[in-house]
Structures are given as C-alpha cells and as structure tokens.
Amino acid sequence: MSVRTGLGYDSHRLVAGRRLVLGGVELASDRGLDGHSDADALTHAVIDAVLGAAGLGDIGMHFPDSDERWRDADSIALLRSAVGAARGAGYAVVNVDATVVMESPTLGPAREQMRARLADALGLDAGRVNVKATTGEGIGFVGRGEGVAALAIATLDG
C-alpha cells in the first residue's frame, strides 16, 4: 500500500456574461469565471490535486486550453476523467479537502451540494470531501473582487 498526496491550485478572473460555477454547482451571481472550459476553479484545483498525487502531471497536460474539445467543458466530467486516469495508474482517491477564496457570493447555501457533486465525481462518500470558504480580506485580486482562487489537497492510496 502506498499513500500519496497531491496539491492543486487554480484561479480565474470574474467577468460579466459568464455563469459562476464552483464545485459543479451554479451560483447566483452577476459575474462568472472567465476560462476556456466552465472555469470551475474549485473543481480544477481538485483535478490538479488528484493528478499530482497520482504523478500524472496537471490539468493543462490532460485538458489544454489550446484544444477546442475542452471549450465550455463541464469540469465535473473532467474530474471524472482525471479520477479514471488515477485508477488506471493504480490509485484510488481516499480524501479531498478544498478551500475557495472569494469575496462574494458566500458559499454557505451551496456548500453541501458542492461536496455531493465532487464526491460523486471522485467516487467517494461525501464525508470524505470537505469544501471550505474564506475571503481575501480586501487584499489582492480576490480581495478586490476581481477573481476567485481555490486550493485542494487529495490523498490517494495504491
């Protein structure tokens, strides 16, 4: 048995005219995240954590933004693919912990739905997935309300 840990990070700019999707859940907002896919920064951080723990590179290697196949892609589907790649390499996801850093809207009302969506894509019980939220306290691009950042750590066993 081999326990491995991976760290993921992603950030996207907030812009008008886009949906705000985090953890596979659409949040009510007048701005959404700018990106090639659905720009779900939380799910992207989880993908990078899973791929990193399995030693399989990063999201950009598997789903490059230069490839039109991934335009407006559902990041939950990309996460399922990353989990499949990790399984193919002999690893199973055991636990994921993630933090979203944003000023607004608050994640509270949607947090359990995000946990459930991520857990389903990871093939885990929701009790093995944690989603936390914090703000930028008025500092940097997040604090100024210009974007969203997310961090995740994944534990895999193989």
Image (cartoon, rainbow, N blue to C red):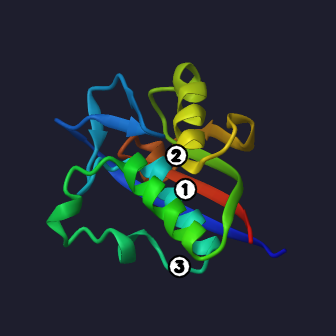
Q: Residues within 10 Å of mark 3 (few under 14, many from 20)?
A: some
What amino acid is at disc 1? Val
Image point (62%, 74%), residue name: 54
Say what secondary structure mark 2 lies in. Answer: helix
Residue 5 in picture, x, y percent from top left = 72, 69
Image point (59%, 64%), residue name: 49
Farthest residue to the right: give it: 1
Residue 12 in picture, x, y percent from top left = 36, 53
* C-beta proximity under 8 Å, tags 1 and 2: no
- In whole angstroms, how far apart are the C-alphas of marks 3 and 2? 18 Å
Say what secondary structure mark 3 lies in. Answer: loop
Label 3 vs label 1, nearer the camera: 3
Determine whether, in the image, residue 61 is placed left or right of residue 155. left
Quadrant that contains the C terminus:
bottom right
State whether residue 33 is above or below residue 58: above
Q: Which residue is mark 2?
A: 121
Q: Residues within 10 Å of mark 2 (few under 14, many from 20)?
A: many
Asked which quadrant contains residue 113, the reply is top right
Question: What number is the disc on residue 57?
Answer: none
Q: Earlier in the sequence, mark 3 or mark 2?
A: 3
Q: Nearer the viewer, residue 75 or 143?
A: 75
Asked which quadrant contains residue 52, the reply is bottom right
Q: Which residue is mark 1?
A: 46
Label 1 vs label 2, nearer the camera: 2
Q: Which residue is mark 3?
A: 56
Q: Residues within 10 Å of mark 1 (few under 14, many from 20)?
A: many
Q: Earlier in the sequence, mark 1 or mark 2?
A: 1
